[in-house]
């Protein structure tokens, strides 16, 4: 509890493929450290595993969703929600994302310190909420929803780790979370009812979810089901995206040469125009910077599964009910696969065919539960970073050391940077 991430990282020193630990009395948890076994767990064994205690808890707190579901229920829910993340839909979200970034950056005061992580959480939440509800909520309702979502997102990690009985205690923390969660559900249910009554398609993700149907019953999603999907999407997507963008800005501030290469690429590809959807794949160096951030500062510190029957994993036989876990953060810092692993080096991804073994690099997971919002997240990050970096420069104080902390995600603790205006050269003028 004092240093959860350091403890998980230290398990690699055992050089054992499987390490059994005790997270809760009476519960057997096996940390899987070998990439081949992680690949087997996520691919070949996926049909016989459910998602484990942490996902059970998330479902209790936020409702059943594609993130928490297992088995056939997961497959059915994934097919319902997947169209919202289709290529054509994501391309329509970029203008919304870019406008939210521009408005956010305009509110930063030059010369003043900025709490970067909090700013990125607010920005990610704003981009998601505008994407989901761009045509469905007026400004006052949107601001209230964003505030309630922020409380839920910040507090859910602690609630997931508490025993069930602690949730029933009349503590201010519990009351705040329950009140915000109820507020989110009430706002979404009202928006669903009003949109259904109007019969209009507002072009946002909410309209897409209202068009989704259950492939077994032919029935549309209920208001409660849509609430659960949006709540879980906000928690699973916003915090992770905010952490990755925070770490990217931190590394660019530490490495001015890398930042200069990003800016040169943006100037060459974009000129004076704003970033568009087609540019996401036309900025290879910025993409490598994001990939290297996902390696060195992956936001996932513990991903769980659970055996539902006696299971053979490599040379070991595990009884039903065994909790399995792997840590992307530790996996991506393994010196056997990534030379000089603590060095931020986007050029290590120059050769896309590095022949990393399966299971060695899992930025969005793997197998049937791989994050279906991966393209959405990458589009969001490229759009946000390209827009921010051309407008402002964020400076670290000299000698500032930023430490990492693992809560719901691995995120920077106390990342404060000073905002400076970016004096970009005109198109055609070299950097």
Image: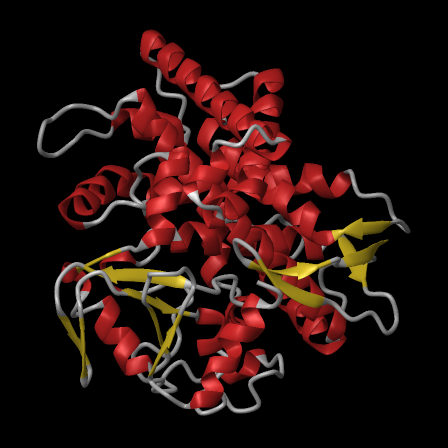
User: Which residue is depicted at the point 49% across and 28% down?
Assistant: 181
Asked if residue 186 is positioned above or below residue 103 in the image, the reply reads above
Near-viewer residue (303 or 289): 303
Quarter occupied by residue 253: bottom right
Q: Can residue 99 be seen in this view?
A: yes
How many marks the image carries: the answer is 0
- Quadrant, the C terminus: bottom right
316 relative to 410 in the view: left or right = left
Quarter occupied by residue 105: top right
**How far from the left and from the top, in percent, is residue 167?**
48, 36
User: Which residue is depicted at the point 53% across and 57% down?
Assistant: 409
State the residue lying farthest toward the top. Answer: 197
User: Which residue is depicted at the point 27% across and 22% down?
Assistant: 222
78 relative to 247 in the view: left or right = left
**How far from the left and from the top, in percent, is residue 219?**
15, 23
Near-viewer residue (402 or 280): 402
User: Which residue is depicted at the point 44% across and 23% down?
Assistant: 185
Asked if residue 367 is positioned above or below residue 77 in the image, the reply reads below
State the residue lying farthest toward the left. Answer: 216
Near-viewer residue (94 or 164): 164
State the residue lying farthest toward the right. Answer: 111
**How far from the left and from the top, in percent, is residue 223?**
32, 21
- Quadrant, the N terminus: bottom right
**How far from the left and from the top, in percent, is residue 389?**
70, 57
Near-viewer residue (422 or 370): 370
Q: Is residue 277 visible?
A: no
Asked if residue 186 is positioned above or below residue 36 in the image, the reply reads above
286 relative to 230 in the view: left or right = right
């Amino acid at each position: 509890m004092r240093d959860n991430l350091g403890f998980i990282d230290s398990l690699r020193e055992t050089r054992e493929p499987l390490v059994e630990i005790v997270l809760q009395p009476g519960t057997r948890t096996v940390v899987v450290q070998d990439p081949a076994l992680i690949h087997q767990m996520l691919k070949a064994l996926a049909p016989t595993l459910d998602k484990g205690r942490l996902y059970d808890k998330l479902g209790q707190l936020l409702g059943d969703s594609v993130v928490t579901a297992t088995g056939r229920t997961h497959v059915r829910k994934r097919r319902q929600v997947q169209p919202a993340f289709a290529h054509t839909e994501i391309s329509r979200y970029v203008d919304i994302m870019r406008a939210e970034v521009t408005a956010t950056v305009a509110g930063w005061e030059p010369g003043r310190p900025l709490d970067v992580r909090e700013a990125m959480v607010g920005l990610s939440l704003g981009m998601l909420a505008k994407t989901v509800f761009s045509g469905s909520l007026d400004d006052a309702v949107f601001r209230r929803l964003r505030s309630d979502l922020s409380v839920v997102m910040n507090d859910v990690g602690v609630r997931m780790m508490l025993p069930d009985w602690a949730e029933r205690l009349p503590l201010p923390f519990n009351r705040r979370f329950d009140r915000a969660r109820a507020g989110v559900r009430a706002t979404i249910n009202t928006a669903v009812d009003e949109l259904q009554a109007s019969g209009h398609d507002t072009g946002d993700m909410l309209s897409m979810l209202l068009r989704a149907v259950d492939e077994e019953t032919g029935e549309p999603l209920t208001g409660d089901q849509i609430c659960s999907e949006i709540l879980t999407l906000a928690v699973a997507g916003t915090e992770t995206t905010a952490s990755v963008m925070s770490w990217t800005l931190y590394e660019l501030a530490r490495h001015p040469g890398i930042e200069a290469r990003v800016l040169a690429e943006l100037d060459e590809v974009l000129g004076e125009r704003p970033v568009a959807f087609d540019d996401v794949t036309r900025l290879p160096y910025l993409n490598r910077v994001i990939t290297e951030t996902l390696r060195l500062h992956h936001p996932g510190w513990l991903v769980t599964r659970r055996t539902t029957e006696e299971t053979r994993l490599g040379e070991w036989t595990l009884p039903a009910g065994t909790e399995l876990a792997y840590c992307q953060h530790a996996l991506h810092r393994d010196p056997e696969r990534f030379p000089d692993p603590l060095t931020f080096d986007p050029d290590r991804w120059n050769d896309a065919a590095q022949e990393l073994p399966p299971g060695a690099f899992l930025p969005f997971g793997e197998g049937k539960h791989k994050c279906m919002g991966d393209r959405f997240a990458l589009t969001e990050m490229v759009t946000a970073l390209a827009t921010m970096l051309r407008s402002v420069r964020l400076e670290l104080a000299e000698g500032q050391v930023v430490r990492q902390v693992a809560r719901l995600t691995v995120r920077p603790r106390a990342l404060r940077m000073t905002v400076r205006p970016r004096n970009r050269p005109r198109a055609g003028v070299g950097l």
